[in-house]
Every structure is written in C-alpha cells, then in structure tokens.
C-alpha cells in the first residue's frame, strides 16, 4: 500500500516529509505574524538562527548515524513478518489507526521518561531553554535526543509491525503537530476549548514550557491530548496566565548561556539536574 501511495505521488518519503515540514513551517510563521498569542522577549533572528541550525545539524546526524529511517525499518519488518500487526495479518485502515494511536502513546511515554530520569533530562532540557515559543521551538531538540528518539521509534515499529505508510503518516503528523503546538498563534478560547479535546493546542502545550516545575511536568502530549487526561498529567491553564507566564527554565535565563554552542554542550553542564523520583 505504501508503495502504491509513493508511486501515485511520484516522490520519496524523505521528499514528502521535507515538503510537509516546509509547508507547515511557512504557514504557521505567517499566522504568528498576523495573530501572535504573546509578545516575544528575545530577538527572533537570534532564536531562529540557533533553532534552525539545530535542525540542519540533526538532519546531518540522522543521515550519518541512522540512515535507516523508521519508514525503511517498517518496510524491512514487513518483509520479514516482524511485529504484532504482521503476525495478525492486520492491514488497511484498522492497522493505520492502531499504529497512529500506539506510536503516539509511545512518544508520550518517552517524553515523560525524559523528564523523570536525570540523565535523559540533561539531554531534553535544551528544548526547554527557549525563552519564547514559536514555530521554530518545535524543532529545537538536541542531536542526542534525536538519536535516542529514532532508536525508540525503530524498536516500536519492529514490535508493532506498523506498515511503511502508517509510519510515514505518523512522522509527518508528529513533525507538523510539534510545530503547531509550539506556535505563537492566537486561537479563540471557545475554539481552543473544543479543539484540545482531539488535538494538543498551542495554549495546552505552552503550559508544559512554564518555569513552574509542576507545570513543566504536565501536558506531555504532542499529537493527541488523551494520554495526559488518561494518566493524570493534564493541566488546563498556567498559574500566571498565558500572557504573564514565564517560559523556559529558571536556571538558564541569560541569553549568553543559551547560544548554539552552549545548547549543544548543555547535557554536560551540572546545573539544575533533576533526580530520578
């Protein structure tokens, strides 16, 4: 099925992912300019240089260390009959829906684990040092985190036996929703109240980037908001309101300490390290 879709589209998975990334990024950047949710504190030029440089670096690292993307692993697992879905001969829409749900649940668990374990928090906290949130923040992940995340997805794909098409759809959705829920866009409260029942909205995820630890350790979802509600990690609003809340980490408020080089070295800095509960 994945091969048929690719042949119809006449493109490669990597090209499709890049096209989706650029399209979503540009659209959200324009909306941020027209309807911003918050006033930005830091120069966008300075932040975007660091955030987009990290995107380029991550792409190079992934191509060098893990050239077999989850899509390729899904095709390989399918040819070998690996995974629950392949063993059950589950295909079509039921397999796609279950794959999207279960892969999203795995990403939720992964995100919580990165907050709970100190050696993983060292890596993940780079994402939380951004003093503003906008579409570029959804791409701000340390290369080490990207490597670990891809390895987890490879293992999940093998275990589940998700089809290449399901994996491709999930990768595109995860990337798009990460940019969306970090975007600095104003959504009417009434619409947000309903939208966050089926999708993690910017107002919902912004709480996760609060300097208040109890708020940082909430709203872990990227695509679906259901896991936070199911596992009691959902927090509706920030204590200080969206306009007045402080974003980032209290240990890293100096812009000179969170430049590109400093961000890459952050896992090795012994400041503000959390302990495993």
Image: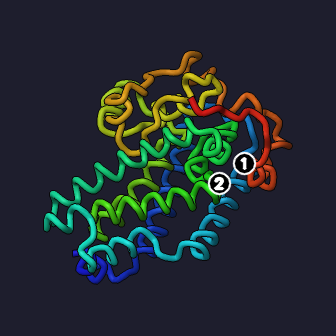
Position in image of residue 74 (x %, y %) = 34, 71
Left or right, 51 with respect to 175, comes to right
Residue 98, x across and y down, in percent: 23, 53
Q: Is 84 in front, or is 172?
A: 84
Quadrant in which the N terminus is drawn: bottom left
In the image, is 17 to the left or to the right of 36? left
Residue 16 spot, x, y in % from top left: 41, 72
Cα–Cα span, label 2 and label 1: 9 Å
Label 2 SS: loop
Asked if the residues shown at circle 2 and circle 1 are in contact, with their CB atoms under 8 angstroms apart, the answer is yes
**Labels 2 and 1: the sequence-earlier one:** 2
Residue identified by numbered label 2:
142
Residue topped by disc 1: 267
Q: Residues within 10 Å of mark 2 (few under 14, many from 20)?
A: many
Q: Against 216, is 182 above or below? A: below
Residue at image position (80%, 55%) is 261
Where residue 177 appears, as percent x and y from the top left, is 43, 49
């Amino acid at each position: 099925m994945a091969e048929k879709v690719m042949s119809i589209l006449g493109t490669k998975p990597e090209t499709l992912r890049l096209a989706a990334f650029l399209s979503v990024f540009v659209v959200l950047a324009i909306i941020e300019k027209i309807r911003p949710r918050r006033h930005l504190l830091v120069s966008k030029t300075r932040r975007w240089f660091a955030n987009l440089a990290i995107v380029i670096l991550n792409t190079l690292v992934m191509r060098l260390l893990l050239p077999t993307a989850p899509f390729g692993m899904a095709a390989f697992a399918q040819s070998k009959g690996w995974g629950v879905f392949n063993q059950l001969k589950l295909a079509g829409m039921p397999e796609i829906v279950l794959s999207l749900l279960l892969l999203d649940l795995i990403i939720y668990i992964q995100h919580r684990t990165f907050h709970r374990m100190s050696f993983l928090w060292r890596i993940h906290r780079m994402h939380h040092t951004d003093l503003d949130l906008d579409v570029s923040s959804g791409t701000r992940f340390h290369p080490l985190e990207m490597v670990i995340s891809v390895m987890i997805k490879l293992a999940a794909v093998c275990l589940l036996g998700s089809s290449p098409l399901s994996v491709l759809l999930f990768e595109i959705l995860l990337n798009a929703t990460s940019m969306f829920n970090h975007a600095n866009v104003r959504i009417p409260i009434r619409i947000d109240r309903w939208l966050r029942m089926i999708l993690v909205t910017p107002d919902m995820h912004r709480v996760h980037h609060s300097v208040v630890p109890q708020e940082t350790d909430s709203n872990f979802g990227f695509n679906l908001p259901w896991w936070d509600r199911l596992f009691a990690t959902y927090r509706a609003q920030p204590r200080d309101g969206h306009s007045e809340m402080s974003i980032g980490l209290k240990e890293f408020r100096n812009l000179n300490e969170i430049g590109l080089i400093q961000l890459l070295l952050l896992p090795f800095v012994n400041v503000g390290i959390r302990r495993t509960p």
